[in-house]
Image (spheres, rainbow, N blue to C red):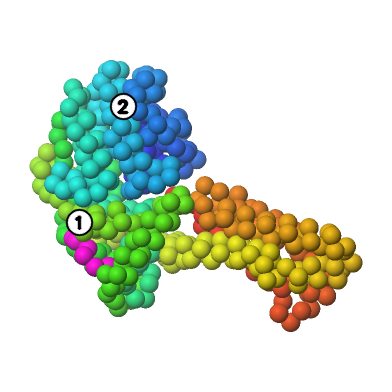
Amino acid sequence: MRVLVVGASGLIGSAVTARLSADGHSVTAVGRRRPEHGLLDVSFVRMDLSRATEPDDWLGHLTGIEAVVNCAGVLQDAPGQSTAGVHEKGVSALFRACERAGVRRVVHLSAVGVDRATPTGFSRTKLAGDQALMALDLDWVVLRPSVVVGRAAYGGSALLRGLAALPVLPVMPHTALLQIVHLDDLVRTIMFFLHPAAPSRCALDVVGPQRQTFEQAVALLRRWMRWPSARTLGVPAWLAGLLYRAGDAVALLGWRPPVTSTARREMTRGATGDGAPLTRLTGIEPRALETALAAEPASVQERWFARLYLLKPAVFVMFSGFWIATGIVSLGPGWERGIELVTSGGASEAFARFAVLAGGSADIVIGIAIAFRRTARLGLYAAFMISIAYAIIGTVLVPWMWLDPLGPMLKIGPIMVFNLVALAILDDR
């Protein structure tokens, strides 16, 4: 079978793509960036779903395609991200193109509960995408999964792991129940409905069999990683509000934090549903999360990820702030001291003024670049190179600073290592 997978670089899309390829199907992967499938033989189409809002944008990619799986989704509007564009306009164009191209079988992933409540742009646009598909003469299947947890982690599932690594679990107010489903069970369901003879024109919840609180889910993951139980600490509503707003601010810089105002309202709504219709129709019974996790023991890599997850934002906030602050100090209160240091190495005062001005300005630009997700990698590379330059120039002009008791030159080494750590953990998925 030739299958088009939209959102193929995401948590679910990458798993679906891998399973299809492993089963011998021909896969065309669609996404904004190439999926992490270096060992798989898949065709890749780079496309921003929010911009592909006309059927003609899709028709050329549907030639020979027998089925489509849409796994694309974004949590909240932000620069470069549009919930309406991804969940409604883009998929509506895709579905209409399928109708025109004669691609009958479409499996579309929505979100559990959107047929009952839509408190956010995320859930409202998800429902609109569902309705656009249901209105067409296609063999459509709408799957509405709950929170998805698998070997890989992204978004909410990654947050669960990060919180599981904390010795004290912060408990946010007003979080409702979850019915977490394992990624493997969701992929198995998708594969079932891709078969031409499978039932169609149905909308089904894909949920685990157990309802649990957010704290219980974190505690389960903590046991999976073989850590002792953690104490809980209730987060006051005012502090929780600040954290959610901080997440919104970070999203404006292009990052995708799991804690945002949208996440707050969605967690208040909860992620529960009725899995009985799915089981009656397919015979598939999603496993309890504890059972699924027991089948794949946590490795040191899972524990590393969990411990680094909540350190990552601290790393980037600290590193961006460090470079911006050093630039401001150089151009402000440290201006005369900087000129004095450069001229002490034999340079002219004119050159010293230029060097301090250029260095301070470069530091600020680097810090700002690191703060924005789109330019963070470039900023980190620039920070590493300028650190080497500072070490060389400092050695030539003021070699005695290597013996300074405050160690301004010696500290360049740890800063460069910190820089490499930031590069190593930059990717989200």
In what element is the residue under mark 2? helix
Mark earlier in primary sequence (1, 2):
2
**Residue extending furthest toward the bottom:** 405
Using the image, determine if residue 14 lies above or below residue 394. Answer: above
Residue at image position (41%, 56%) is: 249
For badge 1, the amino acid type reads Gly
In what element is the residue under mark 1? loop
Q: Main secondary structure of the magenta part?
A: loop
Q: Which residue is under mark 1? A: 270
Residue at image position (24%, 23%) is: 104
Name the image quarter holding residue 397: bottom right
Using the image, determine if residue 356 lies above or below residue 92. Answer: below
Which is more toward the observer, 77 or 186? 77
The percent position of residue 194, horizontal first and vertical second, equals: 25, 32
Using the image, determine if residue 274 lies above or below residue 230. Answer: above
Please give the label number shown on residue 181.
none
Residue at image position (33%, 48%) is: 75
The percent position of residue 322, horizontal first and vertical second, equals: 59, 66
Name the image quarter holding residue 151: bottom left
Discs 1, 2 touching: Cβ within 8 Å: no
The percent position of residue 237, horizontal first and vertical second, equals: 27, 69
Q: Which residue is under mark 2? A: 93
Q: Which residues are magenta?
A: 171-178
Which is more toward the observer, 286 or 125? 125
Label 1 – label 2 distance at C-alpha: 30 Å
Residue at image position (38%, 29%) is: 52
Instruction: Mark yes or no: residue 18 visible.
Output: no
Classify the position of the N terminus by image quarter: top left
Around disc 2, counting alpha carbons within 10 Å, would you say few (fewer than 14), some (14 to 19), or many (20 or more)? Answer: many
Count of numbered circles in the view: 2
Instruction: Mark yes or no: residue 108 visible.
Output: yes
